[in-house]
Amino acid sequence: MKRPVLFLLVLVMLLTMTACGSGEDKAAVATTEKVYKIATDTTFAPFEFEDDEGNMVGIDLDLLKAIAEDQGFKYELQSVGFSAAVTALEAGEADAVIAGMSITKDRQKKYDFSDAYYDSGIGMGVLPSSGITSYEDLRGKQVATKIGTEGNTFAESIQEEYGFTIIQLEDSSTMYQDVLSGASVACFEDYPVLGYEISRGLSMTLPLEMEKGNSYGFAVMKDENQELLEMFNKGLENLKSSGKYDEILNTYISK
């Protein structure tokens, strides 16, 4: 009778140790779960901006939140400004950037982009009283752009032809203020962003049609964080299929 009792005691001990080990393993997984650091702009409405309650909201951030929920990953948002966001990505301080970032050939040499999530273009904003109705009217004057953006690239591409100077600023609000104060006669910005700000009371007008631009994408460094990129693409696909994508866009952009 002693041998069965001893066997049962050993079996109970083994089961207890296994159960404890399993719990420890689960705890280890829980404490080491990846939290992605995702950098974004500070003011680029309607894609990212601070609402009246001080929360960061916008198309980019709502899409990111919905995709993360769909795909089951966690992230930490870093609202640092566009230039700083790209710098953080390149320095390894961020895993990805979502900030109305245009997918261009030059950028694709350094970054891997998700599938496009928004098709954009460039607009020129001026004061309604400026009398500026064409690029020719910019000759001999100063225009404002935001560092590292497609608006800046476009302004540089026509600068020599139309004979104006460019001042590069850090963020959209400072750029707008430069025009409102009269320091610059115009600014170049993504068309939907300028249109949104004007609809909310920004004292500017868009005298010209949108210049064709590039699409926006979610960016990671070349050959890095591919699992995050794949989850973003899959989540975006699911949001479009479910109608959630259109719901988010319609929250911020009226048709």
Image (cartoon, helix red, strand yellow):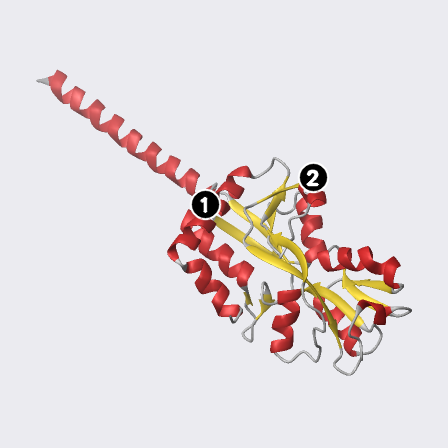
Q: Tag 1: Cα neighbours inside 10 Å, few (<14), some, or many (≥20)? A: some
Residue 140 picture location, percent across and down: 91, 69
Q: Earlier in the sequence, mark 1 or mark 2?
A: 2
Residue 108 picture location, percent across and down: 67, 42
Judged from this view, the residue extending furthest toward the bottom is 129
Q: Are marks 1 and 2 in contact (CB under 8 Å)?
A: no
Q: Secondary structure at mark 2?
A: loop
Badge 2 amino acid: Lys
Q: Tag 2: Cα neighbours inside 10 Å, few (<14), some, or many (≥20)? A: few
Q: Secondary structure at mark 1?
A: helix
Can residue 43 be seen here? The reply is no
Residue under the image location 65 percent in, 65 percent down: 191
**Disc 1 to disc 2, how far (Cα)?**
23 Å
* 210 or 108: nearer the viewer: 210
Left or right of 184 in this view: 12: left
Can residue 93 be seen here? The reply is yes
Vertical position of residue 127 compared to residue 115: above or below: below
Q: Quadrant of residue 26?
A: top left
Q: Quadrant of residue 109?
A: top right
Q: How many marks?
A: 2
Vertical position of residue 28 compared to residue 183: above or below: above
Please give the residue where the numbered disc 2 appears in the rendered image: 109
Please give the residue where the numbered disc 1 appears in the rendered image: 234
